[in-house]
Image (cartoon, grey):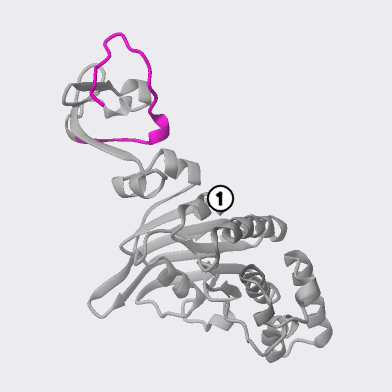
Amino acid sequence: TSVSIQDLSLNFGAVSVLQTLNLDVAEGEFIVLLGPSGCGKSTLLNCIAGLLDISEGRIFIKGKNVTWEEPKDRGIGMVFQSYALYPQMTVEKNLSFGLRVAGIAKDEIAKRIARAAEILQIEPLLQRKPAALSGGQRQRVAIGRALVRDVDVFLFDEPLSNLDAKLRSELRVEIKLLHRKLQNTMIYVTHDQIEAMTLADRIAVMKGGVIQQLDAPQTIYNRPVNRFVAGFLGSPAMNFVEGQLEAGTTAVFKTGDLTIPLDRYGFDGAGNKSGPCVFGIRPEHVAFGEAANSMPFAT
């Protein structure tokens, strides 16, 4: 694995922010941490980066225990929601600043900047200052600052949330292409389900400091493990109908005058269970049609 989080917990006084999290990220995988505001996704990313000290657990990057290592020693590059560019410096100097501080040779710095500029298509911008750049261009430069560090793992903390819808759509594609080109491990935080479904190899859906479900995007969409996950993904949202599960030769869901045999929808595993039940259905799975015993309804 590239990143391994083992039994990680974080407490602020009596408040438990992250609760015994476990997450293994494979080499070259693109993982998205998805959830509503306050669920702990950015906090978890900051723990991986070393910006927050954890209360319990261990963090491994490339097999090395980095739990108490400084951020600069973890082999990670981080891109924040804020571009965090030096306004008085040109793009080229923004890209090279961290490398110069680290004592990297000038020839190597020039080589890394040229490579990053080519990959991100910012070569014509190298002599401009941030004030002369658009929001999308500034975010490319911010990504470039992480890229030139030649790291093993990239961490993205809602990097597109300050951009308009059109730019977000364009940069989503660019980040996906960047991942395919570099094949580096990437962990990406967002509350935007479209970003998550577009970018991720796997999505970790979080709520209340707990990973609710970790799986491929289509699996999470089609087979959510609980009502929160089912309701969080999807636009329009999933519809929920409360009723009763009745056991028999074939399990059925009943609510009012409506009876739905569940075997035809792949829920024959309900078996002999019965009792209160919530039936979830996505809007795209509802269709109008004629039935032998159709129910009239008023409009």
Q: Residue at x 43, y 42 (%)?
A: 221
What segment is highlighted magenta in the picture? 277-299
Provide the major secondary structure of the magenta segment: loop
Tell which residue pokes out farthest to the front in this image.
299
Instruction: Please indicate, yes or no, whether residue 112 appears anywhere in the rendered image.
Output: no
Tell which residue pokes out farthest to the right in this image.
107
Residue 268, horizontal then vertical, whole percent: 32, 24
- Specify the quadrant of the image occupied by residue 223: top left
Q: Residue at x 63, y 87 (%)?
A: 87
Residue 249, horizontal then vertical, whole percent: 24, 16
Q: How many marks?
A: 1
Q: Is residue 284 above or below residue 184?
A: above
Instruction: Please indicate, yes or no, whether residue 166 appears anywhere in the rendered image.
Output: yes
Q: Nearer the viewer, residue 80 or 292?
A: 292
Q: Residues within 10 Å of mark 1 (few under 14, many from 20)?
A: few
Under circle 1, the secondary element is: helix
Residue 174, horizontal then vertical, whole percent: 66, 58
Q: Residue at x 30, y 75 (%)?
A: 11
Quadrant location of the N terminus in the rendered image: bottom right
Q: Nearer the viewer, residue 160 or 28?
A: 160
Residue 290: in magenta span: yes
Q: Is residue 176 above or below residue 250?
A: below
Quadrant location of the C terminus in the rendered image: top left
Tell which residue pokes out farthest to the top in this image.
292
Circle 1 sits on which residue? 198
Q: Is residue 255 above or below residue 209?
A: above
Q: Is residue 157 above or below residue 228?
A: below
User: What amino acid is found at the position of numbered circle 1 in the picture?
Assistant: Thr
Q: Is residue 257 left or right of residue 113?
A: left
Residue 21: in magenta span: no
Residue 25, horizontal then vertical, whole percent: 53, 59
